[in-house]
Amino acid sequence: MFRRLQNMKAHLLVSLCCLIGVSAGGTLVHAEDGASSYNYSFWGDTVASPAAYQATDLLSGPDLGIGPLKEPSDIHVTPDHQIYVLDSGNNRIVVLDEELRPVATIASFERDGKADTFLNPQGLFVTEDKQVLVADTGNKRVVHLDRNFKLVKIVEAPESELLKENFVFQPVRVIMDKAQRIYVMATGVFDGFMEFNADGAFTSFIGANRVFIDPVEYFWKRLSTKAQRSQMVMFTPTEFTNLDMDDEGFIYATNGDSFGNNIKKLNAQGNDILRRTGYFNPQGDIRFSIDLGPSRLIDIDVADSEMYSVLDSKRGRIFTYSGDGHFMYVFGGLGNQLGEFKTPAAIERVGDDFLVLDKALGEITVFRTTEYGRTLNEAVRSYYRGEEEKAFQLFNQTINRNANLEFAYAGIGKALLRQGDYAEAMKHFKRSMDQKNYSKAFLLYRKQVLREHFATIMTLIVILAAGALAVRKYRKTMGRKRGVSIE
């Protein structure tokens, strides 16, 4: 609770600085209104950054040869780069290959010998072996199909003592792990994700968001009457807005929390284990105007090496973070130009490239990496794999292109730390304001110096001790000659 309040105070302080510092320079306006690339410094200032991604293609349904897309809501890419698009308004799933050519269309499936269809589906997930799960929202169910689009099972409204009597099952997002457990994000559920076993039976909730209590409002609630309390905001957890799963089975999720905890990484017990060792908690924009407010994250995509990207619906921006929580780069925006959106709904990676789905326009924007983006991605991957020398070289190339990327200096410092070059590591940790690792490097450097010069130091100590004894003996001898006793 104490850490939570500290985070809240830090967040409010940054917001206050934003309000009173609007005219203090161009950096805030650049982050709030522009769609250009930027980073945040240790002090929370927006600083210029080279573009990590550039929009190269804008594709509509007719461009893809599949007819107009009507309010598409989700997109998923398989390991072999097949692309599944959930065309919600047309109640179908469109499958494309890596070159964005149509492969198949799933508009119905056979159930009990009859054709069954989707109704306003909102969520889609495809496993490594290409089993398809659909959050069939309008039909209040989850549909599980095999790789040939044959029905495996239907997950419908569960019966449980954990659910209210008037509970209405409206799934909007769904994922499945390697053990065939299904996790569902449902409308109006504040207890976390609904977990179903391999047979489709409801087992429990997982990962419920903690309730944030405003101390002032809580105080007034204690003093108010029953009628007054009924008019106040209830202390309920925030709903999740999306989820994804990495190769190890950890669930990454976004929620409506606006105090820097709107991204989570959940283990099997539902505990949040996301590392937040960057200058600021991963949360989208940390500087914003009071009119538009903080980022609202509505989708998350997990890549290799624990990198993950989130989509901000308020500004149409895609933020990417390393596994340690360092802000790597941002791209996108709202507008009418290539690389901007009207209503961004979902993001997915195809290798190192990105696909962004625009729900209102029924279009897919393709973003491809620049040289800077490829170098930074590979630097983070190399560090994650423990390839110190390669990470050192790539991070150096990165800061040659972007001296404002302060966490890259920490990456160089960590690589040097692993190589045993503690003195040079200290310099880079100081540049990146990484006090924890600076202290670690300093202690190791001190031990190294003592170890290397131990013989010299001990010799000096012995010489000084011997000299002190000789001086003392000399003084005693001279004192006796003079008839003076020297202690």
Image: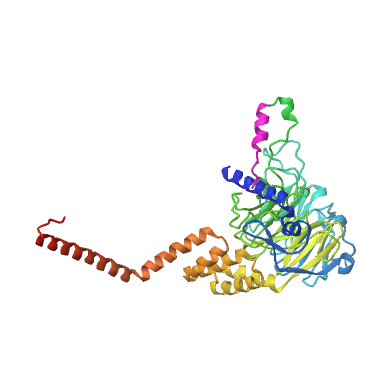
Q: Nearer the viewer, residue 143 or 29?
A: 29
Farthest-out residue, front: 482
Residue at image point 63% right, 54% down: 281
Residue 368 point in image, percent of width and height:
75, 70
Inspect this view and state whether residue 132 appears.
Answer: no
Residue 249 relative to residue 228: left or right: left
Picture layout, residue 16 above or below residue 367 = above
Q: Nearer the viewer, residue 192 or 423?
A: 423
Picture layout, residue 397 above or below residue 169 = below
Residue 265 relative to residue 416: left or right: right
**Region of the chain picked out in magenta, as a range:** 204-223
Residue 401 point in image, percent of width and height:
66, 72
Is residue 221 one of those drawn in magenta?
A: yes
Q: Nearer the viewer, residue 432 or 158?
A: 432
Residue at image point 81% right, 65% down: 339
Q: Nearer the viewer, residue 309 or 392?
A: 392
Residue at image point 59% right, 60% down: 324
Residue 204 point in image, percent of width and height:
65, 45
Residue at image point 87% right, 59% down: 361
Locate the C terminus by quadrant. bottom left
Residue 67 relative to residue 275: left or right: right
Inspect this view and state whether residue 7 appears.
Answer: yes
Locate the N terminus by quadrant. top right
Residue 282 point in image, percent of width and height:
65, 55
Is residue 312 one of those drawn in magenta?
A: no
Residue 241 relative to residue 117: left or right: left
Count of numbered labels shown in the rendering: 0
Colour mapping: rainbow
